[in-house]
Image: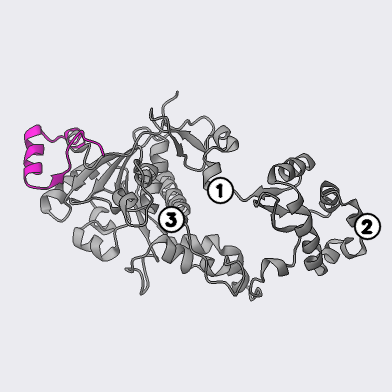
Amino acid sequence: MTEALFAGLKVIDCASYVAAPAAAIVLADFGAEVIKIEPPGEGDPWRTQYKRPGMPPSEHNHPWLMDDRNKRSLVLDLKSDAGHAVLERLLADTDVFITNTPLPARERLRIRYEDFAAKFPRLIYASLTAYGEVGEEAGKTGFDATAYWARSGLMDEVRPDHRAIPARSVAGMGDRPTAMALYGAIVTALYRREKTGKGGEAQASLLASGMWANGYLIQARLCGTIFPPRPPREESISATSNIYRTQDDRWFMLALSSERQWPILAKVMGRPDLIDDLRFLTGEDRRINAVVLMGILDAIFPTQPLSEWRARLDAAGLTFGVVGTVAEIVNDPQALAAGILRPLDDTGMMAVDSPFTLSGADKVPIKRAPGFGEHAATILREAGYSDSDIAGLRDAGVIGGKDGVGL
């Protein structure tokens, strides 16, 4: 294996929960050295997410594994002058500092961009907020469910129809796309530093990422186009781009992309007579008679199980997507073949990989997430602290956790 692309890149992840720490994962996947700074007490709240009320029992800390693997942990009290001094010592040879600490708290902790810019001119300061850095709501806290999913309009737009209640999001669903936005900002800033020698601030927000995801409808409205409320599935204007139930109570999304595919579908369904049916001759005919056509398809697809329709549609080269379940996707042969799921260290388990690859730049193996303060002494020794210095910091409560001990 050749040297990792980001080998030698030093990153401090001074963030919590998902979006900002997940951006650091991608850097770590390509070889960056990432130090996770956590506050004393319970550390990053995401560390104990799997134990919270309503979570199913698990012997594995799956949220922490997913979003903080391949990092080293340092528990550091940034409220103290001594803790802040440790941070600045680490920043002296750090390339990227990542935080999603709320803006008012950054000022109290002295970890704003302006607190570091003059001292560390090559530092990339990566800032993740809920609603952006300026405006009346700049200091407002938010999660992906509130800022990405709800505020952006996505929660409203993906409900089954306009009469249904707004759709709830899945945990972290907006955080990880936002992480990729922050990662993109970081890498762009690193590229600029290569050209100019200067660091700078890279920003992303949950709201900006959510509005980008909802950009089709938002841009249409900005152009004066108003889409009607989403009708129920059974009243859709397209029967050939819709979801259908099979005999074994599974669903798939059919998505014909051209006029020539309609006769192919009719033959796949065993209904070649529909090809010459005057109600469905053209795309416009099928749109006008979509409800009628959908009723016909609703009667055909439940006659066979998903496996049969999947084989037929694949053989015909038609575009469709099985409505997958988490239970089956963890063993999906395509996900395994494409490296979307990769081995987790030597545990025998798999982990979800970051969502892109680069030819000639292998990712490092996925290692487990760190224990609370597991690497404190190692990190501080690398920064020039002696064992007596480290013992003094530990006795004073500036650093916490127990070095060398995992979860």
On the image, numbered disc 2 is attached to which residue? 276
Q: Earlier in the sequence, mark 3 or mark 2?
A: 3
- Looking at marks 1 and 3 on the same chain, the residue that comes earlier in the sequence is marked by 3
Could you tell me residue 35's position as x and y percent?
28, 41
Secondary structure beneath label 2 = helix
The colour scheme used to paint the residues is: one colour
- For marks 1 and 2, give the CA distance: 37 Å
Q: CA distance from mark 1 to mark 3?
A: 15 Å
Determine if residue 46 is in view. no
Left or right: 299 with respect to 142? right
Residue 171 marker: 3
Q: Is residue 25 left or right of residue 38?
A: right
Single out the mark in the foreground, 1 or 2.
1
Q: Residue at x 53, y 71 (%)?
A: 165
Question: Residue 351 appears in which quarter of the rendering?
Answer: top left
Q: Which residues are magenta?
A: 379-407
Labels 1, 3: front one: 1
The picture places residue 135, in percent across and down from the top left corner, at 37, 72
Disc 3 + disc 2, Cβ < 8 Å: no
Which residue was labeled with disc 1?
325
Q: Nearer the viewer, residue 320 or 75?
A: 320
